[in-house]
Structure formats: C-alpha cells, structure tokens
Image (tube, grey):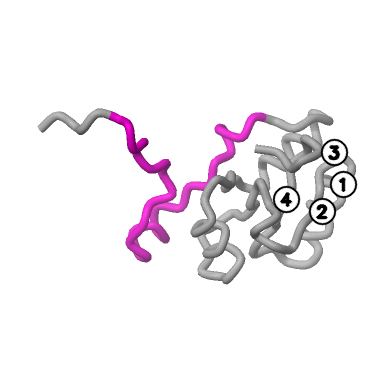
C-alpha cells in the first residue's frame, strides 16, 4: 500500500513530541510522506491501540497497515522501507478490553470454516 507516488503515507498516533519528531524525520529521509489525515495514510504507526479519532477513522476506512514504530526505525536503519508483516501492531490487552481484533478479517470469498 503506497500513495500515488509509490511512497508510504505515514500517520503517527500516540507519540510524545520528541519521539514523533524523530519518527517524522526518519519518514522524510526515507522519502515517505507524513500526513495528519487518516484518509490520506497508507500506514498508521502506533505502539498501542488508541481510541483517538485518527486511529478509529483509519480502522473504519480499512486498507491501511497498522504497524509499530519499530517498522520506521528498522526502515531507517536499513535505509529502505522494510516489509510490514514483522511489525504489525499487536495489542491483545486492548483488543480484549475494547472487544475487537486487529487480525485480518476473513476474506468474503473464503470457504466457510469446517465445524
């Protein structure tokens, strides 16, 4: 998932100013785009599930990667965008407390589960 120029559009959620600035600088150095609107992001970066408007909007919109800050940090160290899968957001405590799952939803054309 990339923006129309092929680069990730990153929305950072839930970071202290110092950490947010550091991550934004890494995104810029990697030629990614820092965005403030969840409708424009391809990747939402946060380290825990949030109930902020931006987090919830990105979830409702779908089609976005939810990754931890380690993805940006690893990418910066490698000087190229890393694969997202090893850095997918996982927060079982918040998922249980808020009664939802960050796990991918089943495909609509997938066969029904065997009972």
Identify the disc placed on residue 28.
1
Residue of label 2 = 24
- Chain part drawn in magenta: 83-110
- CA distance for labels 4 and 2: 8 Å
Q: Position of residue 82 (x, y in %)?
A: 70, 31
- CA distance for labels 1 and 3: 5 Å
Q: Residue at x 78, y 67 (%)?
A: 17
Magenta segment, principal secondary structure?
loop
Residue of label 3 = 30
- CA distance for labels 4 and 1: 10 Å
- Assign a secondary structure to mark 4: strand
Identify the disc placed on residue 10.
4
Find residue 14 and report its image quarter.
bottom right
Q: Residues within 10 Å of mark 3 (few under 14, many from 20)?
A: some
- CA distance for labels 4 and 3: 11 Å
Q: Position of residue 21 (x, y in %)?
A: 83, 59
Find residue 36 and report its image quarter.
bottom right
**Residue situated in front as seen by the camera: 89 or 35:** 35
Dot in front, 4 or 2:
4
Q: Residues within 10 Å of mark 2 (few under 14, many from 20)?
A: many
Left or right: 76 in relation to 110? right
Q: Residue at x 36, y 57 (%)?
A: 100
Q: Residues within 10 Å of mark 1 (few under 14, many from 20)?
A: few
| Callouts 1 and 2 close, C-beta under 8 Å | yes
């Amino acid at each position: 998932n990339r923006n129309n120029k092929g680069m990730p559009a990153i929305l950072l959620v839930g970071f202290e100013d110092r950490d947010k600035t550091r991550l934004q600088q890494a995104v810029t150095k990697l030629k990614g785009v820092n965005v403030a609107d969840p409708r424009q992001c391809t990747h939402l970066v946060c380290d825990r599930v949030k109930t902020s408007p931006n987090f919830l909007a990105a979830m409702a919109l779908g089609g976005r990667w939810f990754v931890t800050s380690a993805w940006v940090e690893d990418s910066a160290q490698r000087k190229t965008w890393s694969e997202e899968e090893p850095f997918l957001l996982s927060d079982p405590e918040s998922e249980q407390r808020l009664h939802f799952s960050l796990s991918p939803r089943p495909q609509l054309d997938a066969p029904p589960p065997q009972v």
